[in-house]
Amino acid sequence: MSAFSSRPPSFMSDYGAPSMYDSAVSTTSATTATAMGASFQIINPNPALASLPPRSRTSIGSGSPPSKRSSLQHSASAPAPNSKFITAGKEKEKAKEREARLSREFEEELEREVQRRAGMGEVLNAMLASSKGRDKAFKVIQYTLKVYLLTHSRSMGALLSKGRADVLQGNLQHTVNSFSMKITIMFSWLAPLNQVLNPPQLPFSTTISTTPFASPTSSTAKPMAPSILQKVLRAPPPVLLSLLQSFSDDVYALSLLRLVPSGVGRRANRLANWCWFFSTLAQLVENGAERAMVRQLVKEVQEKIYEGELEGRDLEKEGCGDVEEGERELVRLKKQLAWIDHGRLKLIMDLIYVSYEVFNFKRYRQPVLATTGLIAGVLSTTKLYEQHKQELLKAAADAV
């Protein structure tokens, strides 16, 4: 036999039958695989692995990578993503966007309708329908004419003849004096009188008996109603000042109508001015306290918003709400502070005016009275306009 034929007979022919050497090799391989499977079953006593064929257990236990065919079968058997769920999700998102857009459009339409119902014409109509609104309008007209007479007295003399200028100036002065009767706000003392006679009830009873040996019948007896004098003494000083000032103004107005003697009218006017002076001082003190409180609130809200944005804290857990809510609260407080300053300026103008009336200052009397009266009238009119506008906005929002 040649050197080439010294190899095993199984390699001699590619298509020949298996030789004795091949059968021996296959028998040895099967025995070895069976022994390995048994040893794997002993080392890893897992019933799930034990139920698998030996070949599978051997491949799993030995950590050999899965074949390419098995990976393709696994990927083919995995469920593909359902396109119906994706389409349904997109439709839900579109429906939410459409609903949000319709909601915004509806809110904008409601806001336009509310603003239309609370326009300038409607607010002026509601303001002039009240006696207080008419008084403010007459006051603005009165002091506007006073300022006009002060600033155009020389121009009227230059444009017109002396006789006509004197007649025009006299007519305007008579118009100004007729506005000072305050007939439109007569009987305004009824509101403070009602507060005096019917004070607000306290949350606790003030009729507890102080007698140490009071009988049970006396403790359950109905308390006596306070007299009018006791109610007047218990009333707050600002309410009493408002009552006395309003009543004195009515007496002065009646004196201008020749229904009351002029001497009584002058004394009533002086008493009304003193009451106005002290009530203005009290309101300035109250305004200063309220202004300091609101400024402190503005500072606290600004600090909370700044610290929350800087440190990333949850403002809702700290009792301040989110950042947007804090910003809305800050805008509201700043608007309130602006109106407090608005009222403060009006009170200062009133104090200057009434000081000239009470202390009878002569220097620059007419220019100061006309200017401060006009500024105070405009400020009070704008505040009353805003009050009526807010009332109409609220009524329109409730109606819509």
Image (cartoon, rainbow, N blue to C red):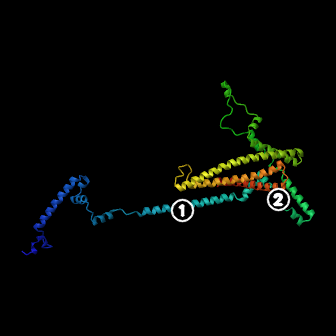
Residue at the far front: name it. 363
Q: Which corner quadrant of the image does residue 57 belong to? A: bottom left
Q: Nearer the viewer, residue 23 or 284?
A: 284
Looking at the picture, which amino acid does disc 2 mark? Val
Q: Which corner quadrant of the image does residue 124 belong to? A: bottom right
Q: Nearer the viewer, residue 397 or 381?
A: 381
Q: Position of residue 356 (x, y in %)?
A: 82, 51
Q: Position of residue 89 (x, y in %)?
A: 46, 61
| Residue corresponding to mark 1 | 98
Residue at the far left: name it. 1
| Residue corresponding to mark 2 | 147
Q: Secondary structure at mark 1?
A: helix
Looking at the picture, which amino acid does disc 1 mark? Arg
Q: Position of residue 296 (x, y in %)?
A: 63, 50
The answer to whether residue 64 of the structure is visible from this angle is: yes
Query: Residue at 11% across / 71% down in the picture?
Result: 9
Q: Position of residue 294 (x, y in %)?
A: 65, 50
Q: Secondary structure at mark 2?
A: helix
Query: Residue at 60% across / 59% down in the picture?
Result: 106
The answer to whether residue 394 of the structure is visible from this angle is: no
Whichever of labels 1 and 2 marks the residue nearer the N terminus, that label is 1
Left or right of 157: which side holds 217? left
In this rendering, the answer to whether 231 lies above or below 74 is above
